[in-house]
């Protein structure tokens, strides 16, 4: 503009800062704000509101509050838009106390709060697990002459769901139907899914209403996406409804955001695959991936794009129709994103002594299960670690942190192992009482390369478990959905996130009067407590599991097993060059002792149990032979054991 001899004024700067806000470029917004005094342009409340909003959208809540505090100094009076942006910044940063403090300052500043002000504060309380405060704010709105809208009730219901106050959430849902004149078509299905409503009449009525509106009018992409997501979460499988959704969604796929495409694909994968819809979604995503330039993304928007792309890969793989074009494009873009992070974040260079081959590592000792973790395979940019029982991969439940072991092992050579937002480089978790192999990345590029493999089903995760009862050898798959809240047990059934556990019954045994099965397991999805909840769901909970068995059963199991009998014995994955790697770890000593205390039911079971005890014949899950029952011998055995 100066070259064109156009004078820069307040409107020019406000428009440019607003553009930066919408593009997530908060640093550029602040740079423009700092240049205004030199240009002899005085910022106003619109300028500061746009700059604070830019910080809010990028998760920079501290910077947003700093700008708000500088406004009196600049003789600019904050208005409701300014306060709304600042409170929203606190909400996104998980700072519910600061958000409430700002809300209390609004009347003092002679600013009238509106529904946006309250919505941001309620949402902040929701994300902070403060459901009582959230509902208290909701109840105060009529006194402040502010009417709650759909967004208000969304935030209040989310607060109830996060805090397991489901009945209260339902009451708020019914209240919202009475108080809000115009609710979106997606609102009610979304709320039912969030609150895990199981009443078939309520669910059916809700989707009948949605089907009617689908046939009568064209819905926006965001609504279609949320409806598809709710459809999958609630376990609905209605071809007529799916077809109506397909007819509306496909012609406007180009208008869907990546996040909305993910919800649409995920809902389809969870409720019954529509191959045509999946192919259309994948073609759209592939086209976007081929044109994307991640260098122009802010860090926040880039991370969101990566997560959406990985989610779409997962949904396509789960549906069994992941196209080669989508996988190739996603792999290229996601690896590039990792490489950008490596260059930006450093230090992440490899020590000079490391070659591109496998590196020396600690020899695994299965006879010391309570010792320190051990590095089983060490490659230049990724490694496999043995996690002993009692260690946590990454969290706050115990002082024994696998992330601390990794940081001590690698030092400061690799930035990602100190990055909690990227799980300190770990690709997956393993429950605290369980043992087994865990994959970790040393670089962001390796991390995202492995993430692609994980979401595309290219990483094999094989386990051995001992569970209650004699599992029928014909049982090959458990495909129950799961959901969980907070620290409560994971619930398996017909609602929640799609989950798939594959199994091979390799041996039957007993301990005293307790029937047991030794089962080789491969997970096709990796949900929280998936194996434990799935086996409990089919009536065969894992041995010594205090979370998914009755207390009496748990106490009885401790007579012969010291901890939950679940061990991840094998991982198979590829390196950056595409070379296959396989890592195996025998059953640790404490579980071996438990196996030595059980009695095999038949000769095949005896041989299999012996193999696991001595650590021989470890192999891929798919190479195990399921137990073949001799029904004549089985009848005699049952007779001797009193018909067990």
Image (cartoon, helix red, strand yellow):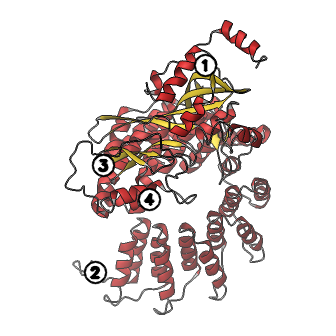
* Quarter of the image where the N terminus is located: bottom left
Are the residues flagged by discs 2 and 3 in contact, CB closer than 8 Å?
no
**Cα–Cα span, label 2 and label 3:** 53 Å
Please provide percent x and percent y for residue 262. Answer: 50, 45
Q: Which residue is mark 4?
A: 404
Tell me, for residue 6, which label it has, or none: 2
Please provide percent x and percent y for residue 374. Answer: 41, 47
Q: Nearer the viewer, mark 3 or mark 4?
A: 4
User: Label 1 neighbourhood size at 10 Å, few (<14), some (14-19), many (20+)?
Assistant: some
* Quarter of the image where the C terminus is located: top right
Q: Which residue is mark 3?
A: 381
Q: Nearer the viewer, mark 2 or mark 3?
A: 3
Tell me, for residue 383, which label it has, or none: none
Q: Which residue is mark 1?
A: 473
Residue depicted at x 41% and y 80%: 11
**Cα–Cα span, label 3 and label 1:** 40 Å
Residue depicted at x 71% and y 46%: 196
Residue depicted at x 72% and y 9%: 636
Mark 2: secondary structure = loop
Quadrant of the image occupied by residue 74: bottom left
Q: Nearer the viewer, mark 4 or mark 1?
A: 4
Quadrant of the image occupied by residue 330: top left
Q: Nearer the viewer, mark 2 or mark 4?
A: 4
**Cα–Cα span, label 4 and label 1:** 41 Å
User: Label 4 neighbourhood size at 10 Å, few (<14), some (14-19), many (20+)?
Assistant: some
Q: Earlier in the sequence, mark 3 or mark 1?
A: 3
Are the residues flagged by discs 4 and 1 in contact, CB closer than 8 Å?
no
Mark 4: secondary structure = helix
- Viewer-proximal residue among 409 and 493: 409
């Amino acid at each position: 503009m100066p070259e064109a001899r156009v004078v820069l004024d307040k409107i020019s700067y406000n428009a440019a800062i607003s553009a930066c806000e919408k593009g997530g470029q908060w640093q550029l917004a602040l740079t423009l704000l700092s240049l205004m005094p030199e240009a002899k342009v005085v910022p106003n409340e619109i300028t500061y509101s746009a700059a604070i909003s830019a910080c809010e959208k990028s998760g920079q809540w501290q910077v947003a509050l700093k700008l708000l505090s500088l406004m009196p100094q600049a003789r600019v009076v904050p208005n409701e838009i300014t306060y709304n942006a600042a409170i929203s910044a606190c909400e996104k940063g998980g700072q519910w106390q600061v958000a409430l403090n700002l809300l209390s300052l609004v009347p003092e500043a002679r600013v009238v709060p509106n529904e946006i002000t309250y919505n941001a504060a309620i949402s902040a309380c929701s994300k902070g697990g403060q459901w009582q405060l959230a509902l208290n704010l909701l109840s105060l709105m009529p006194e402040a002459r502010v009417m709650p809208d759909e967004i208000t009730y969304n935030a209040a219901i989310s607060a109830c769901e996060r805090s397991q106050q489901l009945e209260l959430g339902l009451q708020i849902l019914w209240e919202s139907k009475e108080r809000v004149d115009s609710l979106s078509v997606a609102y009610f299905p979304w709320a039912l899914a969030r609150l895990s409503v199981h009443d078939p009449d309520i669910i059916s009525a809700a989707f009948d209403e949605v089907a009617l509106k689908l046939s009568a009018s064209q819905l926006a992409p965001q609504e279609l996406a949320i409806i598809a997501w709710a459809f999958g979460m609630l376990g609905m499988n209605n071809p007529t409804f799916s077809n109506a959704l397909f007819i509306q969604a496909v012609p406007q796929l180009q208008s869907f955001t990546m996040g909305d495409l993910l919800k649409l694909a995920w809902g389809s994968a969870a409720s019954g695959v529509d191959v045509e819809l999946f192919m259309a979604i994948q073609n759209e995503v592939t086209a976007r991936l081929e044109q994307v330039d991640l260098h122009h993304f802010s860090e926040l928007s880039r991370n969101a794009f990566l997560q959406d792309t990985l989610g779409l890969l997962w949904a396509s793989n789960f549906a069994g129709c992941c196209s080669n074009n989508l996988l190739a494009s996603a792999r290229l873009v996601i690896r590039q994103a990792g490489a950008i992070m490596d260059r930006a974040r450093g230090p992440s260079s490899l020590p000079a002594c490391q070659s591109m081959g496998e590196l020396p590592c600690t020899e695994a000792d299965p006879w010391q299960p309570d010792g320190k973790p051990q590095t089983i395979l060490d490659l230049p940019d990724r490694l496999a670690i043995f996690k002993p029982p009692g260690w946590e991969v990454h969290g706050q439940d115990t002082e024994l942190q696998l992330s601390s072991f990794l940081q001590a092992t690698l030092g400061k050579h690799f930035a990602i192992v100190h990055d909690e937002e990227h799980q300190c480089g770990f690709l997956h978790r393993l429950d605290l009482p369980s043992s087994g192999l865990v994959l970790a990345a040393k670089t962001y590029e390796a991390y995202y390369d492995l993430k692609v493999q994980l979401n595309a089903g290219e990483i094999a995760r094989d386990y051995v478990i001992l569970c209650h009862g004699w599992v029928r050898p014909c049982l090959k798959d458990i495909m129950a959905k799961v959901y969980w809240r907070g620290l409560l047990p994971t619930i398996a059934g017909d609602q929640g996130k799609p989950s798939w556990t594959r199994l091979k019954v390799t041996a039957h045994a007993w301990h005293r009067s307790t029937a047991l099965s030794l089962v080789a397991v491969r997970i096709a999805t990796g949900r929280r407590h998936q194996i434990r909840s799935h086996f409990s769901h089919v009536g065969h909970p894992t041995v010594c599991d205090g979370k998914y068995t009755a207390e009496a059963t748990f106490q009885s199991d401790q007579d012969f097993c010291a901890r939950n009998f679940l061990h991840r014995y094998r991982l198979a994955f590829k390196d950056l060059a595409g070379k296959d790697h396989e890592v195996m770890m025998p059953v640790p000593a404490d579980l071996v002792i438990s196996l030595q205390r059980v009695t095999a039911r038949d000769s095949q079971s005896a041989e299999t149990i012996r193999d696991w005890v001595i650590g021989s014949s470890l192999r891929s899950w798919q190479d195990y032979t399921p137990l073949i029952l001799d029904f004549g011998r089985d009848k005699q055995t049952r007779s001797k054991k009193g018909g067990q």
